[in-house]
Structures are given as C-alpha cells and as structure tokens.
Image (tube, rainbow, N blue to C red):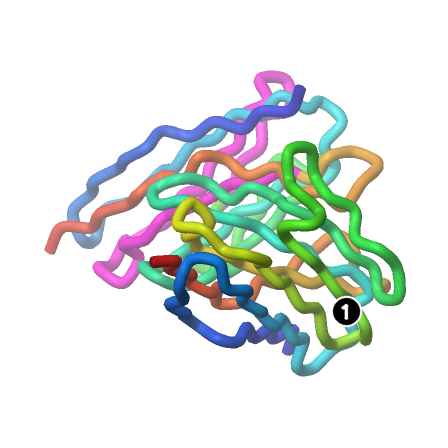
Amino acid sequence: GAVVSQHPSWVICKSGTSVKIECRSLDFQATTMFWYRQFPKQSLMLMATSNEGSKATYEQGVEKDKFLINHASLTLSTLTVTSAHPEDSSFYICSASTSGEQETQYFGPGTRLLVL
Amino acid sequence: GEDVEQSLFLSVREGDSSVINCTYTDSSSTYLYWYKQEPGAGLQLLTYIFSNMDMKQDQRLTVLLNKKDKHLSLRIADTQTGDSAIYFCAERASGTYKYIFGTGTRLKVLA
C-alpha cells in the first residue's frame, strides 16, 4: 500500500516552454502533498506543501508564478514549471501523506527535467 | 534554524555491518526517519522512530537515537551489494508536517 506515482519519469524540453508533472496517490487519499527539488548529489529541498482544495504554501525563495501547484483532488497534484530555463533542470520528487497518518510521507519515483 | 547533517560517504565490505550517522538540531523533533535512494529513483522509507524511543529494530536494520546528543544512527547488518545507495535521515519539524532532510550518505558495498 501507500504507492505514489509520478508522470512523466523524465522530460526534455526547450527553454521557454512549460512542463507539467503529475503526482498521484494510487491506493490512498492524499490530503497533503509535497513537492521537492533535488540537485545532483544534494539533498531534497522542499518547494511547497499543498492541501487538497487549497492554495499551496511555498517555501521561502520559491517563486509561486514559476512553479504552479494544483491539488485538485485527493489523489492528484500537479506541478507546472512555467517558461522553463536551463537552471530549472533538476530532479523533482513529490510525496503524499494521509489525514490518518500525517507523520509519514510516501515518495514518488521522481521526475527528471532537462531544459535545453 | 533546523539542520540535519550526515557524513557524505561510507564504504564497507559485503557481509560487514554498516553504520550511518546523523545529527540534528531541533530538540522538539517528534519523528526521525531513514530513507534509501537508489540511482535515478525516488525515496524509499526504510524505518522511522518516535523521539520517545531509544532504539528500533526491523530485520537487518537497527535505529539508535541519542536524544541528549541529538544523534541518530542506522545500522545495517550483513550488508549486501543491493544496499548500495544514498541514505537520507530526516526530521519532522515540530508543529508541522515539514521534513528536514540531511545531506545524504552514499553507501558503497564492496564485493
């Protein structure tokens, strides 16, 4: 149980385009979802926290208009990187937690984004 | 502020025990976690411990918590080549569901 998927697993795009990444909880209802960014050989940095039906809470230094997060249902959250640039290239990982087990986050497999 | 630190590398021989260490700063942390990340993959939860516990064992994994020194360790018994990965410890900030991750320890198991 507690499986989280991400789609796509990797994406290459041209500079200036927008990229949408999906995060789904497959067998549980995710009341809270988290988006992280991981640079090569570095730790995970939390970008934002989203609760279903509410606006996301962004961490300091993360541009809201650059990284659009939508948590429209209890099983789906999306991260859209708008007008992507090469410096946005990174590994994006989502995680999800349930209302009954909010202490534990279940992580997706990650999406590798390369902006040319 | 909160900070979680780990040594960057650890190399062990197959069959030996591995001990990965982590120090944290938030004395009010309630949960502490160990995650495993294989190349190109997401994070796999290995185990977690409540801050009111000193030790937790789960098959080959043993977690030790020293609250006084704010030190957490993960011991892997009979380490196998499949254990080669990056191991992250994380603390959950008090009053929130926000995780603070360590820098990760790259474990290399030599055959």
Disc 1 crowd, CA 10 A, few/some/many (<14, 14-19, 20+): many
The percent position of residue B62, horizontal first and vertical second, equals 48, 46
Res A12 → quadrant: bottom left
Magenta stretch, residue numbers: B63-91
- Residue, x 78% and y 60% (percent of image)? A32
Res A5 → quadrant: bottom right
Q: Amino acid at mark 1?
A: Ala
Q: Is residue B50 above or below residue B77?
A: above
Residue with the most extreme front position: A16
- Residue, x 41% and y 70% (percent of image)? A11
- Residue, x 79% and y 33% (percent of image)? B94
- Residue, x 75% and y 65% (percent of image)? A70
Q: B104 or A75: which is nearer to us?
A: A75
Q: B42 or B61: which is nearer to us?
A: B42
Quadrant showing the C terminus of chain B: bottom left
The residue tagged 1 is A30
The percent position of residue B65, horizontal first and vertical second, equals 58, 32
